[in-house]
Image (spheres, rainbow, N blue to C red):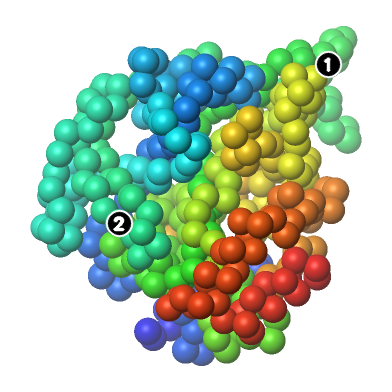
Amino acid sequence: MSEIRVHGPDGRTAHQDLHSERGALRGEHPGRSRNPVIKVADLAWLEFEKPDLERAEVFARDFGFGVAARTESELWLRGTFAGTPCVVIRRGRGSSRFIGPAFRAAERADLDRLARATGADVRDVGVPGGGKAVDLLDPSAFPVRVVHCGEPLAALPEQQPLLLNSGTEHRRTNAAQRPPREPSRIQRLGHVVLETRVFAQALSWYLDTLGMIVSDFLFLDGQRDRGPTMAFVRCDLGSVPADHHTLAMHLGPGTGYVHSAYQVTDLDSMAAGGAYLKERGYRRSWGIGRHTQGSQLFDYWRDPDHFMLEHFADGDLFSCHVEPGWAPMSTSGLAQWGPPATRDFLGASPSPQRIREVIQALRGDNEMDPARLLGLLKATKS
């Protein structure tokens, strides 16, 4: 694919001075498709299956979700912003598992266009408020749903950001600061991170089929010539700024869910909510800190089924004019500040399941090989 560059009036490329010290080298992946089938507007929701909906609801409320709908077999969770629910958990008989993401189509006609291009059908989807969907499989065999919903959920009351005094700017006088110890109130779903053994194929699928564009690429030290091994991917809303990443994917020996992220009001909301979660007996995976790619404040937690969820605030917003940045993959590069990344967050513990995944990946027909595996192990220690 040929290189795409957008230049400013001084001749500098669009990514310079914005988010990355490095851009693409000549001939490297441009980070977007020239003629995508459609351009999705956002993530709509994520789908999970769990045997214990009661326990799932207790954690969801403690983490800061509201409940949009509840039946014997389904739990729909929402944030305070108007729009679609952000998580659906269906009752299952086996172990808990992630099903897949649902993306929001910008227009109803996009579903027809997508169905014609893929040979899929447009069908009703049982979301609160009603809607239509096209169901697909990505190259990693993840079910991916593209939806256009009917009646949006109304907005709920917000946690208000605290007024802060800064230097000589005194916005708060004769008033003390006392944020309540309560759950961080989730505003919306921000992004999902997936691991895949077929990174290049999966990335091309999301760019070509859903019209997403790359904000940042990461590559393994000494292996840049083999292409990137992680991408932070955003929706292409043209000149309207979008989240730095709505989807992130990285090459790995497994195929599955890594974490999902949910926006909260500000740092105080995040910290007070984290203190509340700790008092309730939940386990922090990593945080609080500020990421490098995406710049967001973060705090990661494990739910009772061991899924990782992130509270985030103050993330980057990019229009379509910003080109991908390129950086080496490393643990030290994950955050600008904060505690060191934990082994739990990195998935670096040598569990029996992880060992099986490595063996299967090295034996299978995919993008994992010994050099890639050693590079990934090196990145977790750098």
Q: In the visual, does 382 lie left or right of 48?
A: right
Q: Earlier in the sequence, mark 1 or mark 2?
A: 2
**Residue at 41% across, 37% down:** 47
Residue 232 marker: none
Residue type, numbered disc 2: Leu
Q: 287 left or right of 208?
A: right
Kindly tell me whether residue 319 is visible in this rendering.
no
Is 51 positioned to the left or the right of 74 in the image?
right
Does residue 136 lie above or below 321 as drawn? Answer: above
Q: Residue, x 84% and y 53% (percent of image)?
A: 340
Label 2 residue SS:
strand
Question: Where residue 9 appears, x then y in whole percent?
Answer: 51, 74
Residue that badge 1 annotates: 177
Residue sitting at 43 percent across and 83 percent down?
3
Name the residue carrying label 2. 137
* Residue 289 x, y percent position in the rendering: 78, 45
Q: Residue furthest top?
A: 174
Q: Is residue 92 left or right of residue 174?
A: left
At numbered mark 1, what does the secondary structure look like: helix, strand or loop?
loop
Q: Quadrant of the N terminus?
A: bottom left
Horizontal and vertical percent position of residue 56 = 54, 24
Residue 362 at least partly seen: yes
How packed mark 1 is, by other alpha carbons closer than 10 Å (few <14, some 14-19, many 20 or more), is few
Q: Amino acid at mark 1?
A: Gln
Mark-to-mark CA distance, 1 and 2: 49 Å
- Where residue 347 sits, quadrant-wise, is bottom right
Q: Position of residue 199 (x, y in %)?
A: 47, 70
- The answer to whether 232 is drawn above or below residue 371 in the figure is above
Q: Dividing the image into 4 quarters, which one contains the C terminus?
A: bottom right
Please tell me whether residue 135 is drawn above or below residue 92 in the rendered image.
below
